[in-house]
Image (cartoon, rainbow, N blue to C red):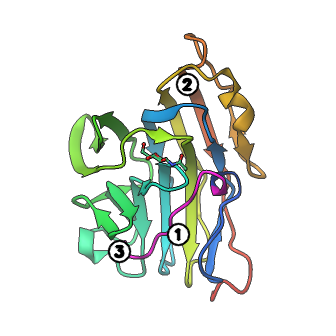
Amino acid sequence: MRAASRYLITSCALAGLVSSTVADTWGPAFSLGPTKGAVIGTTTTFIPGNPPADAETGLYLWIGVSNGTSGLIQSGVDQDADNSYCGATATEWCLSASYFGVGGQFDGPYVAVSGNTEIGISYMLSGQTWTQTVTVAGKVVSTLTSEDGPLIEGGWGTGTECQQNCKGTASIQKYLNSVIYLSEPDESFLNTLGVGEGVEYTPMETTDGGQTWTIASITLPVYTAPPGNDN
Ligand SMILES: *[C@@H]1O[C@H](CO)[C@@H](O)[C@H](O)[C@H]1NC(C)=O
């Protein structure tokens, strides 16, 4: 259902997300990159908040990692006017692992979740293979693999993607206990941070000289799409 509905973000675009179509707008983001070495993994807990009561196609909330030439690894939640494909009610999201690359959009299995669900998201690299693992209450609900290898000069960022008739979000979004794993220490990764208006966050921390970064809390504000977004 998410197929072809999402767009690749490049490492430079992570700081100010650029869209491919006029009717595609973006909520305020928290984004990092490019790193000096490579992004090789991340874990976070995502709480999407309640979806808009009047569902319109489509709203897509995700945490992304990519570099300028890779695909985009982007597990997260979707709301379209009809979310019955995942069995969601009007007050639920469709949740899945997801990847956008040269072959198009690929999604892992979908499940329906409510807005206050604590969604565990992990992207781990082994060899050239990235594995996305999405969990709810410790149970794996969706997985997906892709083959981009270490994301050299890669970035990490939140996506609040609002397409076609989307009017925006109805709730704040939270990312808790985010951890970003780099291939080598990069103390200056901190300085690549780009933060949209109204985004609140705790300071980025590292205890190993900049190879592993943690962010205890990121809160994205409610986003209202600008007029003209076909809405
Ligand atoms: C992105 O990472 C891939 C895989 O390691 C690498 O081949 C490619 O050169 C990187 N792209 C950029 C722009 O650094």
Q: Which residue is label 2 attached to? A: 214
10 Å neighbourhood of mark 1: few (<14), some, or many (≥20)? some
> Alpha carbon of mark 2 to alpha carbon of mark 1: how far?
30 Å
Question: SS for tag 1?
Answer: loop
Image vertical order of residue 107 relative to residue 135, above or below? below
- Residue interval drawn in magenta: 1-13
- For the point 67% across and 21% down, the residue is 187
Q: Which mark is residue 52?
A: 1
Q: Which residue is label 3 attached to? A: 3
The kind of residue tagged 3 is Ala
Q: Is residue 210 left or right of residue 57?
A: right
Residue nearer the viewer, 18 or 51: 18
Question: SS for tag 2?
Answer: strand
The kind of residue tagged 1 is Pro
- For the point 62% across and 83% down, the residue is 23
The kind of residue tagged 2 is Thr
Q: Position of residue 228 (x, y in %)?
A: 71, 87
- For the point 61% across and 32% down, the residue is 36
7 inside magenta stretch: yes
10 Å neighbourhood of mark 2: few (<14), some, or many (≥20)? many
Q: Which mark is residue 205?
A: none
Please name the predominant secondary structure of the magenta segment in the image.
Answer: loop
> Alpha carbon of mark 1 to alpha carbon of mark 3: how far?
21 Å
Say how many tags the image has: 3
Are the residues flagged by discs 2 and 1 in contact, CB closer than 8 Å?
A: no
> Alpha carbon of mark 3 to alpha carbon of mark 2: how far?
31 Å
Q: Is residue 211 left or right of residue 222?
A: left
Q: Is residue 134 left or right of residue 64?
A: left
Question: SS for tag 3?
Answer: loop
Are the residues flagged by discs 1 and 3 in contact, CB closer than 8 Å?
A: no
